Amino acid sequence: MLQYLKKRWKYLVAKLSGNFEESADPKVQLEQAITEAKDQHKRLRQQAANVIANQKQTELRLNRAIEELERVNANARQAVTMADEAYTSGEAEKAGRYTNAAEQFANRLLTLESEIESLKSLHFQASEAAEQAKGAVDQNSDLLQKKLSEKQSLLSQLDQAKMQESVNQAMTTLSEAVGEDVPTFNEVRDKIEARYAKAKASAELSESNVETQMLEIEKAARNAEAHSRLDSIKAELGIETAATPVEAIPEAAAKPAAEPAGEPAAE
C-alpha cells in the first residue's frame, strides 16, 4: 500500500509539473532564470572572496612567522655571544643564564621553522584555491554576460513566436468550423457556388426546352393571325395598312391564317 501511495504521489507531482510548464509564461521564466544566474554569481563571488581572504590570512601568518624567526634567530645568536663572553671573563653564573636563554631561543627557532613549513604548505594550497576561485568567478561572469546579451534576442524570438502562433490560429480558423451552428467560409462559398451552378443549369435547360420553343411558335402564330385579322378589319373600313416586316414574323407563322368563312376578301 505504501509503495502504491509513493507511486501515486510521484505521478501527481509529475502531472502538476507538466501542467505548470505548459501554462507558465516563458518571459517570466526567462526573468527568473536571469535572476537565479545573478544570485548564483553573487554567491560564487562571496565564496571566492572567502577563499582569497583565507589565502591572504595565511600569507600574513607566514610573513609574521618569518619575521619572528629572524628576530628569535638574532636573539639566539646574541645569547650565545654573551654566554661565550661571560665564560671568557670568568663569570660562570652569568654565562649559565645566557646559555639557558640561548637554548630557549633555539627551541623557539625549531618551533617557528616547523610552523613556517606548515604555513608555506597552507599558503601554497590557499594560493591555488584562490586562483581557481578567481578563474571560476571570471568564467561565471562571462556566462552571465552571455545570458544577459541573449536575453533580448530570446525575448524577440518569443514575441515572433507568439505572433506566428496567432497567425497560425487565424489561418486554422478559416478552414475549420467556428462552432456547431456557424459554417466555415469554405462551406458558405461551396454552398453559394452550388446554388449558382444549379440556377445556371436550370436556365440552360429552360432555354433548350422543346415545349418552351413550341409555346413561343404558337404565340408567334397567334400574333400573326391577330395582325391578319386587324388588316382585314382595316380593309373593310378603307384604312390603309402598313406592311408587316417579314423578318419580324417567325417562319412557323409566316403564312397567314385562313380567313373565316363568310367574310369578304380584302381588296
Image: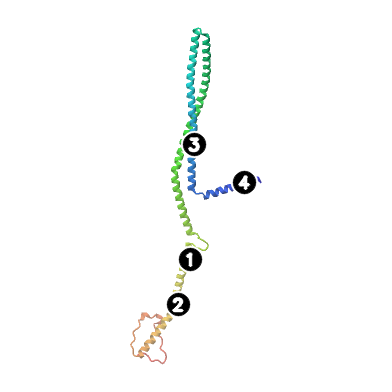
**Quadrant of residue 217 within the rendered picture:** bottom left
Q: Secondary structure at mark 4?
A: helix
Question: Which of the labelled discs sits on residue 30, or is there none?
Answer: none
Examine the rendered structure and indicate whether residue 168 appears above or below residue 53: below
Report the side of 262 relative to 93 (left or right).
Answer: left
Q: Secondary structure at mark 3?
A: helix
Residue that carries the numbered disc 4 in the rendered image: 7
Residue type at tag 2: Thr
Q: How is the image coloured?
A: rainbow
Residue 190 picture location, percent across and down: 47, 64
Residue type at tag 1: Lys
Residue that carries the numbered disc 1 in the rendered image: 191
Residue that carries the numbered disc 3 in the rendered image: 44
Nearest the camera: 102 or 121?
102
**Which label's residue is closer to the chain start, 4 or 3?**
4
**Which label's residue is closer to the chain start, 3 or 1?**
3
Q: Which residue sits at x=55%, y=48%?
A: 18
Disc 3 to disc 2, how far (Cα)? Answer: 99 Å
Disc 4 to disc 2, how far (Cα)? Answer: 84 Å
Q: Tally the marks.
A: 4
Viewport quadrant of the C terminus: bottom left
Residue 59 picture location, percent across and down: 48, 26
Examine the rendered structure and indicate whether residue 9 appears above or below residue 194: above
Residue type at tag 4: Lys
Residue type at tag 3: Leu
